[in-house]
Image (cartoon, rainbow, N blue to C red):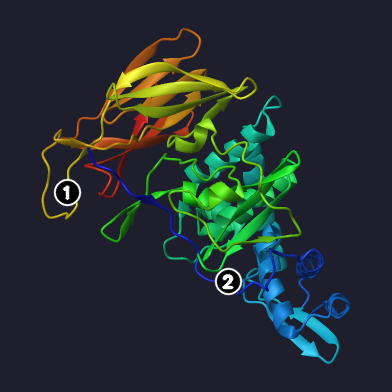
Amino acid sequence: MISVFLAAVMLIGCLTVPAGANVVIDELAPAMIAGALKFEENIDISDIVNKNKWSLNEVTALLANAYLVCPELFFVSNKITVNNRGSNYYIQLDYTMSKTEQAEAKKKIDAACEKIVAGITPDMTDVEKLLYVHDYLILNCKYDYDKKNYDMYDCLLSRSAVCQGYSLAYMYILKHYLGIECSVVISDAMGHAWNYVKLGNSWYHVDVTKDDAATVYKNKSYDNYGFAMHENFLMSDELCRNTSQPHYKWKVIGDLPAADDTSYDGAFWRNVNSPIILNGKTGYYAVMNEKETAVDICSYNFKKDTGKPILRVKARWYSRRNDSGSENYSYGKYYYKQIWTSLALRNNKIYFNTNKNVYSYDLSTKKSSKLYTLDKDDRQIFGMMFTSSDMLRLAYRYDVTYPESYLSLRLK
């Protein structure tokens, strides 16, 4: 059996954060947003700076981080200039859109957000809402390896972004559409950003970018279509420091308490590498049953905190390349200790894939049906997603270390 290294690439570089546990920018962020929405050339922040007795360097660093909690500034580059004239301080922003362009882009962003939250039902708990948006962004945005896309517009509409874009989109949806408090965490040491969310009276880390994992092989990264990890969803500080790819030396933006509640550290989703699809109070997901050489489709009741397998299908994903990449294994010789099963829900049926087949499972009749078998030599299905109500897009390749190819399957 072969293990696979899964990783997510991260944003490089923001200005260094001032010393302290958290970065407090409560006054600067609203002032910057208000001035930017008016497209002001010089945004006056003199009163705020003088009251707090900040130096010019402190103001510049704080503003750079204020930018990271302002998803609304998608039409502003992260090149922020602060001019100092005696006791007067002014922000100069680099506008990347005109007023008209900004207004049109904002309409598109809000339409995209409304489409996302339309999948959230009134009976969902806040945990389910957070999970739904987490998986939606992972399934509908790819990491930008060229590191050009940094804002929520890129994540929601261009569907390609670095960690900053994922974090800003997640925060915008949670705060403005779901009423869930959310901020951003940054680590200059990691060159990375993620989210900080509030449930009840406690705060938790959520790293959407890391859960949108790519396969790293011989210094190349391969995307995984329809694949969603959950190792970095609702973590305490303790767990955040001790995942398979630990976080470190971070600072929270905002005067917020530590994430010291460990209630979710042992949650069922921690080792789930399929999308978790939600249907009322129930979630469905796939896990590997190594003993039975199979994929288990499982259900989980969020309100009762109970789960169980509902269907088992034989499956293995086989490796073709060895670690050196210079030799090819024969198909069926070695298999991965990992599954690449995607799930989707349509008309009360769960659709899912194994390495060679696509199945449906009727939640009413409890019966499964094989819908399609991939007939492309020894290539295998490594994920799938619906692109319309009756069209499934499948990703296939020889093994996880090869680029993906795609085909569309129309369902009856």
Residue toward you, 289 or 66: 289
Q: Can the viewer see residue 206 in this picture?
A: no
Q: Give the crowd class for mark 1: few <14, some 14-19, many >=20 residues within 10 Å.
A: few
Q: Which residue is mark 1?
A: 322
Instruction: Indicate whether 32 appears above or below 381.
Output: below
Q: Earlier in the sequence, mark 2 or mark 1?
A: 2
Amino acid on which the number 2 mark rests in the picture: Cys
Instruction: Indicate whether 321 appears above or below 165.
Output: above
Q: Which residue is mark 2?
A: 14
Report the side of 391 relative to 86 (left or right). Answer: left
Rendered location of residue 72, percent (x, y): 70, 59
Instruction: Indicate whether 39 appears above or below 104.
Output: below
On residue 374, the disc is none
Amino acid on which the number 1 mark rests in the picture: Asn
Please say if the residues under marks 2 and 1 sit with CB atoms less than 8 Å apart: no
Q: Give the crowd class for mark 2: few <14, some 14-19, many >=20 residues within 10 Å.
A: some
- Residue found at the very far bottom of the displayed protein: 86
Q: Can the viewer see residue 31 in this picture?
A: yes
